[in-house]
Amino acid sequence: MKKIEDLSDLNKKKVLLRLDLNIPLKNSKITDTTRIDKILPTLKYLIKKKSNVVIISHIGRPKGKFDKKLSMLPVCKYLSDKLNIKVELIDKKISDIDPTSMFNNKSDKIVFLENIRFYEQEEKNDEKFAKKLSTLGEVYINDAFSCSHRSHASVDKITRFLPSYCGIQMNTEVNALKKVTSDIERPITCIIGGSKISTKISVIKNLVPKFENIIIVGGMANNIIKYKGFNIGNSIKEDGCNSTIDEIFLLANQNNCKIFFPSDVAVGKNKDDVALIKNLSEIENDDIILDIGPKTINSICTILENSKTVLWNGPAGYFENPNFAVGTKEIVKKIIDLKKRIYSVAGGGDTIAVINNLNAFKKLNFVSTAGGAFLEYLEGKELPGISALNT
């Protein structure tokens, strides 16, 4: 991909900047600024280069209709305060914007288009819409890795009409994921959680030939525990996945990859209960597996100590209850302790929540705020937003 740094002259250039600022709102107030804060280096770089920036982004799923509750205005206000410059929201329809009227006021350096998903043409990857959008800039920069698995007009088709580059965060994200998928320092370990194996099977199948260890925790580990002949009581499970597990173990054996699953667990009778540690043979019919046990934690820590690279996606238990967050916390602590010895990449919605709760965001080597794009990259899929920048 061509990078933003490859542009020799950005002075007064109108830059169309695609960002993913799909942040959570409550009563029009931002409740988590993580995604905004991560793209600040690109904005500061463009400000330093004296560019005129037109930001394209979205919030939520308005399905091609205007929804005041999903306006970009709160993000404009936040960025104005954060950057200490005026950030104006253009509330005109894109079809009504005159490109020659933009930035006539010398104080304007950054402007925002209203939520791009207010237009149904965006998600249809409409070429005419992309062409009209492109008239608002002279250069296009994609710094929205987390949207780059979508074939949308402002991610894909727009690159046909403007010189196109990746932003600082996009480049950082891709380079970090390369370190756990292609440019690997071995041994490499993947810790993967979640409630359903079916949602991660493609990731596991793609990573097994490349990784030495795959550690399966969380709700999806219950299926493997049951597959191995143990009672899992009332624990969350996915039906009809034995053939999937057969495939995982067969593929692992063929590629000398070790599959690890819990040897002991923390159970409760409900999600609000206190934790009781049990070996797998001790689980009762009314028990719910909600975390990994101390023997499993110790085994994972030993594996990490003998690794050079680690990929983490998904908590080890029901972390919403502190009684069942022990396994996840200990994994995070171990990865942080080993930071000088291993390269760590973490990602996924629940994983981000855990990392924020533990104030560990800056203590790992790289944390991806992408959800679907993160997983699809790990599956080995081609992402439209990246492919578009390579053409």
Image: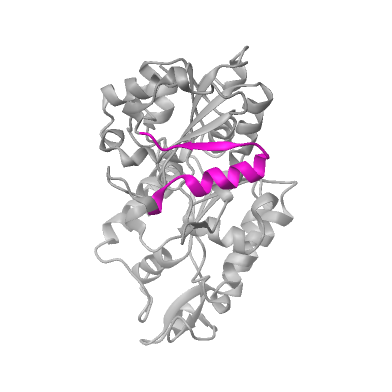
**Quarter assignment of residue 106:** top right
- Say which of 385 and 347 sits in front: 385
* Residue 115 in the figure: left or right of residue 310: left
- Say which of 60 and 346 sits in front: 60
- Extreme top residue here? 8
Q: Residue at x 60, y 72 (%)?
A: 326
Tell me, yes or no, if residue 256 can be seen here.
no
Query: x%, y% of residue 358?
Result: 64, 63
Report if residue 140 lies within the magenta region. Answer: no
Quarter of the image that includes the C terminus: top left
Query: x%, y% of residue 8?
Result: 62, 12
Tell me, yes or no, if residue 134 can be seen here.
yes
**Quarter assignment of residue 52:** top right
Report the coloring of the rendering. Answer: one colour
- Extreme front residue here? 105
Residue 270 lies, with reference to residue 13, above or below; the image says below
Q: Residue at x 48, y 16 (%)?
A: 138
- Say which of 283 and 371 sits in front: 371
Q: Residue at x 30, y 55 (%)?
A: 244
Q: Residue at x 58, y 69 (%)?
A: 327
Residue 246 lies, with reference to residue 56, above or below; the image says below
The span picked out in magenta is 69-92
Query: x%, y% of residue 357?
Result: 61, 64
- Say which of 42 and 367 sits in front: 42
Residue 358 lies, with reference to residue 121, above or below; the image says below
Residue 133 lies, with reference to residue 69, above or below; the image says above
Report if residue 78 lies within the magenta region. Answer: yes
Query: Total label count?
Result: 0
Query: x%, y% of residue 155?
Result: 39, 30
